[in-house]
């Protein structure tokens, strides 16, 4: 079979991809021109590979996301500390921001719970949830900030979970990240990063920026008030309130109930 190389920005390529996946379950609700453009870019304009990738995502969404609400107690428990958080501010271009804070890890070895929490937050970040205060991104992308203060062998995720996290981000949320800002990464993380390097695709590598005690680097991306918030260590005066945070999600009202005891 001859593989077609297309210009990812070409309206014809986008229309062709939309037509190829139109019959797939879930395509009519989720696939639009912007989605097709992201998958084409992720596969360097190769329509066959983009179609295969998008079909795999549709299958994954049907299986994984269909029960997300039913797993909301595990999501709430896994994120009780605020280790993942879609911020109340955007970057200077209006992109939403997700902060990850390993020091707040509370269920390191619970693989499924952590993946559920990741996917919930990616949906919240990219507009898949009805959440107050998260404006749509001007270009469909977001900033992911990883704050490694307090990172240690005791909160370092298992390799299995790290690889699954990377696979979800690269395969099912392609071209959603504008930048990955890695703050205060210690030597221990650099060893971990080298082990993960071969699993990171080239486009993702290009978006990774290490930031260590560099306020100016943050100011290039964020307004001063956001820089102040990011400069504080996670969990120290950052105003985290799990009830308030999850109450912003209109689709998970039971999460805000004081009687929703987590097990």
Image: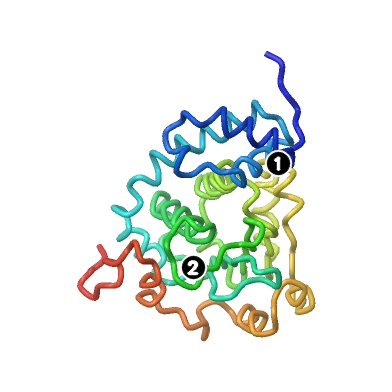
Q: Residues within 10 Å of mark 2 (few under 14, many from 20)?
A: many
The residue sitting at 42% across, 54% down in the picture is 109
Residue 83's tag is 2
Question: Measured from the top left, where is residue 190 in percent x and y?
Answer: 70, 58
Question: Measured from the top left, where is residue 215 in percent x and y?
Answer: 75, 79
Q: With respect to residue 120, does 101 lie above or below?
A: below
Q: Quadrant of residue 143?
A: bottom right
Q: Quadrant of residue 189?
A: bottom right
The residue sitting at 70% across, 33% down in the picture is 12
Left or right of 129, for residue 257: left
Q: What distance separates the C-alpha of mark 1 from that of mark 2?
A: 30 Å
The residue sitting at 54% across, 45% down in the picture is 168
Secondary structure beneath dot 1 equals helix
Left or right of 190, for residue 111: left
- N-term-proximal mark, 1 vs 2: 1
Question: Measured from the top left, where is residue 100 in percent x and y?
Answer: 56, 65
| Residue at far left of view | 259
Left or right of 147, for residue 8: right
Q: Residues within 10 Å of mark 1 (few under 14, many from 20)?
A: some
**Quadrant housing the C terminus:** bottom left
Secondary structure beneath dot 2 equals loop
Disc 1 designates what residue?
41
Residue nearer the viewer, 87 or 191: 87
Residue nearer the viewer, 77 or 260: 260
**Quadrant housing the N terminus:** top right
The residue sitting at 46% across, 39% down in the picture is 28
Residue 57's tag is none
Q: Name the front one of labels 1 and 2.
A: 1
């Amino acid at each position: 079979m001859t593989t077609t190389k297309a210009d990812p920005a070409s309206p014809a390529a986008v229309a062709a991809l939309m037509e190829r996946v139109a019959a797939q379950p879930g395509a009519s609700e989720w696939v639009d021109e912007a989605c097709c453009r992201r998958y084409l870019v992720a596969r360097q304009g190769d329509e066959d590979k983009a179609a295969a990738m998008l079909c795999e995502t549709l299958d994954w969404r049907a299986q994984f996301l269909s029960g997300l609400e039913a797993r909301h107690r595990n999501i709430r428990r896994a994120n009780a500390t605020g280790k993942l958080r879609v911020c109340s501010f955007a970057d200077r271009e209006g992109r939403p921001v997700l902060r990850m804070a390993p020091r707040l890890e509370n269920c390191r070895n619970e693989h499924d719970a952590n993946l559920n929490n990741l996917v919930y937050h990616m949906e919240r970040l990219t507009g898949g949830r009805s959440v107050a205060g998260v404006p749509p991104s001007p270009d469909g992308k977001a900033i992911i900030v990883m704050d490694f203060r307090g990172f240690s062998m005791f909160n370092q995720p298992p390799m299995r979970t790290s690889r699954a996290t990377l696979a979800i981000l690269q395969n099912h949320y392609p071209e959603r990240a504008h930048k990955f800002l890695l703050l205060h990464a210690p030597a221990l993380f650099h060893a971990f990063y080298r082990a993960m390097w071969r699993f990171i695709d080239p486009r993702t590598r290009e978006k990774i920026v290490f930031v260590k005690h560099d306020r100016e680097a943050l100011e290039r991306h964020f307004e001063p008030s956001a820089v102040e918030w990011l400069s504080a260590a996670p969990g120290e005066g950052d105003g985290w309130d799990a009830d308030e945070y999850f109450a912003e999600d209109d689709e998970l009202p039971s999460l805000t109930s004081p009687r929703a005891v987590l097990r």
